[in-house]
Structures are given as C-alpha cells and as structure tokens.
Image (cartoon, rainbow, N blue to C red):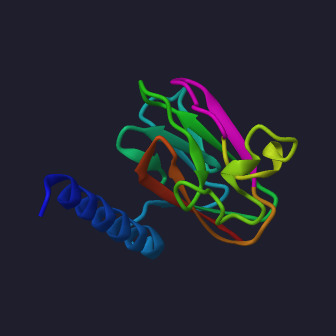
Amino acid sequence: MEKGALIGVIVVILIVVGFFLFQSGDDATEIKEGSSQSSGSENSVKIANEIEMTSSGFSPATLNIKQGDKVTFVNKDSSAHWPASAMHPTHTVYPGSDIKKCGTNEERNIFDACNDIPPGESWSFTFNEKGNWGYHDHLSASLFGKIIVS
C-alpha cells in the first residue's frame, strides 16, 4: 500500500473513532447549571456556562444548560481556536447551522464562530434548541465536546 493511501486510511479511522467517542460522552467532565468552579485563585471563578479552549481540548467537555442559555467559549491557549457545531467540516448538526452561512446575514444565528478566536478572546452563542449538540474545533477537528440543552 502506498504511504499516502496508508496515511489516508489512518486519518479516516481516527475520525470515525473520534466520532463514536464524541457521541458516547461517557468520560466527559460535566458541570451542572448554576454551579461554579475555582481555578485555584480567589479572583478566578469559572461560571457554569463558560467553556475554556486549550491545546488539550474543551473544558468542560460536556455542559448541561437550559434552553435559551448562552455559552461563552474562552480561548485560554496560545493558539487560535474555532468552536463550531459538529460535524467537521460542514458544521450542520445544530439546527440551521452550516459553515456556508458564515459571512452572511445568517451568521449570528448559527452555532459557528465562523472565525479564529485569538488567545485571550471569547465567543458566545445562545442555545435555543433542546437536544444534545456535539461541537468541535474547526482548526483542530480532533478536539470536541457536547452541549446538552434541556
């Protein structure tokens, strides 16, 4: 088998395995709505509807919220991140979302940052649809999480 074909097969296998791990969500960290966590210093309190983006992924990886709640994705890394609805690269799992809507008048209504979020910056989205919504980092598709909206 050619080296390029072998690499392609390995990439496909990793994506499929990642998808199934993402869908199960059993090992994910969870923060209940209304709770808070401290990151070690008294001045740094993490609110329940905030998700940190780092090189190792999203924290918490799974977040339970109520319909109509806003979630803020904060880049705590030295590299840019781009949170968006699953599946990569189309971003169409959350109702009405599609990467094709980036740069249009519909952009503000889709679960897609539509741009890199630089280090230290954030992006927010309000979840109006109930369900289990998978998402990923468009710049590092192996990083993913889940928002559970009740």
Could you tell whether 93 is left or right of 17 in the image? right
Q: Viewer-proximal residue, 106 or 8?
A: 8
Q: Viewer-proximal residue, 49 or 107?
A: 107
Residue ID at (82%, 41%): 104
Residue ID at (63%, 34%): 115
Residue ID at (74%, 64%): 66
Q: Position of residue 132 (x, y in %)?
A: 62, 71
Quadrant placement of the C terminus: bottom right
Q: Position of residue 92 (x, y in %)?
A: 66, 62
Is residue 102 placed above or below 90 in the rendered structure? Answer: above
Q: Is residue 62 visible to the viewer in this orientation of the structure? A: no
Q: Is residue 120 magenta?
A: yes
Q: Is residue 143 magenta?
A: no
Quadrant placement of the N terminus: bottom left
Furthest-right residue in view? 105
Q: Position of residue 106 (x, y in %)?
A: 84, 47
Furthest-front residue in view? 2
Q: Position of residue 88 (x, y in %)?
A: 52, 56
Q: Viewer-proximal residue, 39 or 58?
A: 58
Q: Is residue 49 visible to the viewer in this orientation of the structure? A: yes
User: For residue 85, what is the image quadrant?
Assistant: bottom right
Magenta segment, which residues?
A: 114-126
Could you tell whether 56 is left or right of 37 in the image? left
Q: Viewer-proximal residue, 119 or 86?
A: 86
The tally of labels here is 0
Q: Main secondary structure of the magenta part?
A: loop
Residue ID at (54%, 54%): 89
